[in-house]
Image (tube, grey):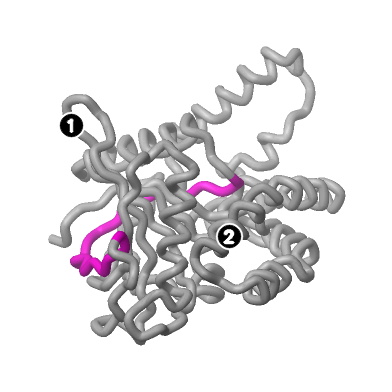
Amino acid sequence: MRLLVAALVVAAVFANQDFLERARAQMEEQGLSENEIEMMLTEESEGELERALEDLKKGSTYSWEEAKGYEDCEVFRKEMRDEWAAKKKKMGMVGKKGSYGKWDKKSKKKGACPSKPKPMDEICAESECPAFDLLNTTGCGYIARSIKAAQWVGTDMADADSSKEYMSAFWRLFGYINGGNSDGTKIPMTVPVLNVFTMDPTTYAITSARMFFYIPADLQGSAPTPNDDSVYIENMNEQIAYSRALGGNNPSKERWTKYFTNLYRALEMDGITVDTTTFATAGFTRPYFGRQRQEAMYFAPLQ
């Protein structure tokens, strides 16, 4: 297991090199000095392997239910078992012991599967999260939170499918919290990075895409004005967020589609109706570093 975890982290470090190069270029565009850039990159790299290993090992101390924050639906677990069985058959592995049983959430066994999400209580103990209340639900397959009204800093993304546009949006927001505001204030990074999309109900084409950072509690109501005209402060009303959590790095479009589909199915089984033309992805963890948590999310007005 230790070798597996080490291999995963080493692979992540190499995969992260392109990200670091792009990060350097974006920080230069944001006007950071060479000394500031080197300090930030050094701070991020020192002891990275050790910290990532320690974080990944923590994944073996809790069950899938504890990791996700909800119990998954039996129908979804059965579909996953059937899907895994079909893959084994296709690969000629029928009759051989596979790893899915060890990671099957139904067993509620613990284990360090790299796709196991990082629990929210750990995340919010390390970084500031928006204020929310967990809502009691009778269903399965999702978590429901009442997200309190708050200010967020946002920017538009012209192309929802462009990784370059995504990175540009991130660094525009980073520029704001790094002092690119009317007070020249450096603001702590919070979680999640929230990407909100609006879809045409007829053509299913994305009509708008926006990225947001949560404004820390001590600046709520008094957030400084962004210097960049493409960055803005938005007051979001209190609302209900329904979500499914996933771990691992760089989920494919197919995986995101599956999670949104199963989120809708889980809500439908519980008699909950949502407007699926507005949806979001939320990233709660630093990419390629230790355990990950991302969420597929639908919203509903507070009743």
Residue 253 seen anywhere in this rendered image of the structure: yes
| Residue that appears at 65% across and 50% down | 109
Residue 150, picture quadrant: bottom left
Mark 2: which amino acid?
Arg
Q: Which residues are magenta?
A: 230-249
Q: Look at the image and tell me in which quarter the C terminus lies.
A: bottom left
Indicate the position of residue 50 as horizontal and vertical percent values: 80, 65
**234 is within the stretch colored magenta:** yes
**137 is within the stretch colored magenta:** no
Q: Nearer the viewer, residue 51 or 14?
A: 14
* Secondary structure character of the magenta stretch overall: strand
SS at circle 2: loop
Residue 283 lies left or right of residue 288; in this view the side is: left
Q: Nearer the viewer, residue 192 or 29?
A: 29
The vertical placement of 259 against 111, above or below, is above
Indicate the position of residue 274 as horizontal and vertical percent values: 21, 44
SS at circle 1: loop
Label annotation for residue 286 = 2
Residue 193 lies left or right of residue 228; in this view the side is: right
Residue that mark 1 sits on: 201
The vertical placement of 247 against 257, above or below, is below
Indicate the position of residue 103 as horizontal and vertical percent values: 65, 42
| Residue that appears at 41% across and 74% down | 180
The 10 Å Cα crowd at callout 2, few under 14, some 14 to 19, many 20 or more, is some
Q: Nearer the viewer, residue 22 or 96?
A: 22
Mark 1: which amino acid?
Pro
Residue 135 seen anywhere in this rendered image of the structure: no
Q: Nearer the viewer, residue 260 or 217?
A: 217
Q: Residue lying furthest left in this view?
A: 303
